[in-house]
């Protein structure tokens, strides 16, 4: 019953103010710096990843804060491509500055920065929820959660 109820509020959780603001920020950067058509493709890929990770987070009954970090990570992990770089450090720098400007809690910014490292395989997952970021390595949520 609890899972079903949380699934009903899925849309509300996916559209928290910081996630909406981040989506608009990423969309604007992609439109400004990426070739036409490729910008929408990259945005679509980020949204697909976000929906996948949030869905897995809901299945795993993660907290709202953890799910929000998953959604933000999906949007911000590959943002460095606007500068023709696939640099983890550039993505982290952009994410950190943007979220700090939005008054996002510093402790959660650190979690997100570590999550970006996990996505780019520069760090190993420390938290159970970070295993979702390794996404394609696991077929089922049962494989992620012991």
Image: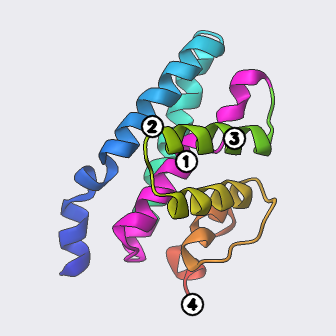
Q: Main secondary structure of the magenta part?
A: helix
- Circle 2 residue: 22
**In terms of secondary structure, where does tag 4 sit?**
loop
Q: Residues within 10 Å of mark 3 (few under 14, many from 20)?
A: some
Q: Could you tell me residue 18's position as x and y percent?
A: 38, 44
Q: CA distance from mark 2 to mark 1?
A: 10 Å
Asked if the residues shown at circle 4 and circle 3 are in contact, with their CB atoms under 8 angstroms apart, the answer is no
* Mark found first going from the N terminus, 2 or 1: 2
Q: Could you tell me residue 62's position as x and y percent?
A: 40, 74
From the viewer's perspective, is the residue at label 1 or at label 4 nearer?
1
- Circle 4 residue: 146
Q: Residue at x 59, y 9 (%)?
A: 36
The circle drawn on residue 93 is 3
Q: Is residue 82 left or right of residue 13?
A: right
**In terms of secondary structure, where does tag 3 sit?**
helix
- Quarter of the figure with residue 134: bottom right
* Mark found first going from the N terminus, 3 or 1: 1
* Mark found first going from the N terminus, 4 or 2: 2
From the viewer's perspective, is the residue at label 3 or at label 2 nearer?
3
Q: Residues within 10 Å of mark 1 (few under 14, many from 20)?
A: many
Q: CA distance from mark 3 to mark 2?
A: 14 Å
Q: Residue at x 79, y 23 (%)?
A: 84
Q: Is residue 52 above or below residue 81?
A: below
Q: Could you tell me residue 118's position as x and y percent?
A: 71, 61
Q: CA distance from mark 4 to mark 3?
A: 33 Å
The quadrant in which the N terminus is found is bottom left
* Mark found first going from the N terminus, 3 or 2: 2
- Circle 1 residue: 74
Q: CA distance from mark 4 to mark 2?
A: 32 Å
Q: Could you tell me residue 58's position as x and y percent?
A: 37, 68
**In terms of secondary structure, where does tag 2 sit?**
helix
From the viewer's perspective, is the residue at label 4 or at label 2 nearer?
2
């Amino acid at each position: 019953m609890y899972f079903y109820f949380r699934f009903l509020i899925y849309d509300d959780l996916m559209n928290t103010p910081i996630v909406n603001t981040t989506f608009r920020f990423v969309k604007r950067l992609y439109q400004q710096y990426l070739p036409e058509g490729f910008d929408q493709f990259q945005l679509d890929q980020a949204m697909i990843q976000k929906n996948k990770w949030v869905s897995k987070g809901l299945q795993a009954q993660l907290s709202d804060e953890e799910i929000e970090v998953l959604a933000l990570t999906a949007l911000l992990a590959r943002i460095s491509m606007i500068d023709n770089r696939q640099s983890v450090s550039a993505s982290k720098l952009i994410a950190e500055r943007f979220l700090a400007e939005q008054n996002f809690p510093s402790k959660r910014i650190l979690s997100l920065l570590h999550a970006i490292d996990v996505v780019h395989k520069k760090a190993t997952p420390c938290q159970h929820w970070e295993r979702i970021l390794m996404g394609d390595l696991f077929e089922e949520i049962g494989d992620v959660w012991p």
